[in-house]
Image (cartoon, rainbow, N blue to C red):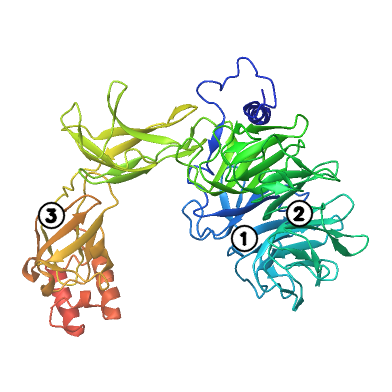
Amino acid sequence: MPRAFNRRSLFALACGLLPAIAGTHAAAQCAPRWINGGEAGGPGGLVYAMTQWDPDGTGPQAPVLVVGGTFTSVAGDSAIRYIATWNGVTWAPLGNGGVAARALAVLPNGDLIAGGDVAIAGGYWIARWDGSSWAPLGSGVNDRVNALKVTASGDLIAGGHFTTAGGAAASRIARWSPATQTWSPIGAGVNGAVYSLAQLPSGDLVVGGAFTTAGGISARFIARWVAATGNWSTIGATPINNLVTALAVLPGGQFIAGGYFTSSGGFPTNYIARWDGAAWQQMGAGGMNSNVSAMMLMPDGNLLAGGNFTIAGGGVPANRIAIWNTASGTWSAIGPGIGGGVYAVATFAGEPIAGGNFQTTGTGQMGIPYFAHYGQPVAPTVTEKPADAIACANEQTSFEVSTAGSAPITYQWQIGTGAGTWASLALDPIALPCGGSAYAAGATARRAAISISPCAGITTYQVRCVVTNDCGTDVSDPATITMNSQVVPDDPQDAAACPGGTVSFSTTANGYGPYTFMWFKDDQPINIEANPSAATAELVLNNLTADDAGRYNCLVRNSCSGAYTNYATLTIDDATCCIGDFNQDGGIDGADVQAFFAEWELGNPSADVNADGGVDGADVEYFYIRWEAGC
């Protein structure tokens, strides 16, 4: 069965909207549940608004869910502030965060609008994301924006606490025209904060909030702006008795109001009511037992509602979120619900989404802070195994595993103990059968720092990670740890050379590099700027003088240790040098004469064969004496 169908059908089954499907694979061990925003977590603070948005319209990019609130980090990333996008798996920022968003909307041209608490780009309390940056809507408004609604004509209606829009008077509600790039008031507005907006099929606006008048007439907490006349009017003869914080329009044009009220039209309706065109009606016997903060009409025509209630329809346990089936007129819970206030609701990829001020499910299960989606958990898979490493004995080496699947995911790092057996690592050392030991800081986390006290004669070990969630377990391919041996460098050999000659000393090391080398003469480090070979495995000394005689050794290091070679002695002895064999090829012939004069004509110190400090005719005379003498 395709995964997309599974997610939708399991959600519907959980809400009582489909008959039970016998033999469903996930029934026992992997039932639908509330899931957080991903393995790394989700918003680090309150969520107030959510909407779906397609970043490139008809382009190849997939739609994302835009989430807004007062959070200043997402998934632990403080660079994601106030507004973020979620693709069902990972989070991403939108610029520098825009506004501390309490309302979101998408214009017909694809621009994303955010309204809320703070200012950006000179556009106070409301801003537009055009795909690359945030920009103001004109000169914005002068106070908080709580609600946004895009009309059928493409205009944007904003409601909140403000009293001016675009610099002109606009009492808590105003219209932005994308065509003219201007703000205009909606009549005389209302006299208190606007918290919710909706548009009816007729084009009329329904406005809910904390006001008591609209356009100067009495209209307690809810009012209608009549598009045909440009006037405000009341809804029903007897007003709602408290704040309206959420509105939704049903397909036939009836609309639903939710909030803090307990009566509508003079009858008990308890926090939610439906206007049928003539009167207010209850939404199930007894309504809710606490306020409704957010509502939306889902693609299937049913209503998703969130708030602080724990009972829906007078008797259905439904912790803070519930679905109203418009066909049957009944409420259904969504699993165990949510353990704290739900301030925003949405659907994405066929799943209901809740945002607000919560940490747990309705049954107290931790792990869904501020944001959760309800659906089929996905079994964990290891997407990238830990990398092989060269490690030092008794020193921590880091390993990491990448995974996919529904959070929460648990981790357990293990070390191979031979013959296909594995032992679970812990912070305290565990004994290895061969006589060594191992431990891991982060043994039950995605990243672990593993330390091994190796066994005699064993140079490689294997570690792996076991990942588990409600739906199953996966095991990473093992990483091989190669224990780096202590450095034991080979010793350079003694050497004797003539003044002006060249000599080299070399060393090698076992184990694993990279290595560093530092050569010393008479226990003093050789200047590597003057002689770069002093930082290599082979030290080369040119144009030797008597001052170069002495003891040479090298310090060799790798990532685990370092060691000095023994000394090699360099002797510079003119008496034992065969000057006549100038090119030092073992023979006395014309090639030596050519080599000598090539150096002598250049005035190089190697031609100072009489070692008197100068290159002159005396050196020519001395060279011929030695050459003719055969040494």
In terms of depth relative to the viewer, which is nearer, 54 or 83?
Answer: 83
Measured in 3D between alpha carbons, the distance from the residue under mark 1 to the one under mark 2, in whole angstroms, is: 30 Å
Tell me the element at label 1: strand
Q: Earlier in the sequence, mark 3 or mark 2?
A: 2
Q: Quadrant of residue 106?
A: bottom right
Q: Residue at left 70%, top 27%?
A: 17
Q: Residue at left 87%, top 58%?
A: 153
Disc marking residue 565: 3
Mark yes or no: residue 389 visible. Answer: yes
Residue 539's spot in the image, x, y percent? 22, 62
Measured in 3D between alpha carbons, the distance from the residue under mark 3 to the one under mark 1, in whole angstroms, is: 67 Å
Q: Earlier in the sequence, mark 3 or mark 1?
A: 1
**Which residue occupies the extreme front position in the image?**
266
Measured in 3D between alpha carbons, the distance from the residue under mark 3 to the one under mark 2, in whole angstroms, is: 95 Å
Mark yes or no: residue 110 visible. Answer: no
Instruction: Kindly identify the amino acid type of the residue bearing the numbered disc 2.
Output: Pro
**Which residue occupies the extreme top position in the image?**
22
Rendered-image quadrant of the C terminus: bottom left
Instruction: Kindly identify the amino acid type of the residue bearing the numbered disc 3.
Output: Thr
Tag 1 residue: 101
Q: Earlier in the sequence, mark 1 or mark 2?
A: 1
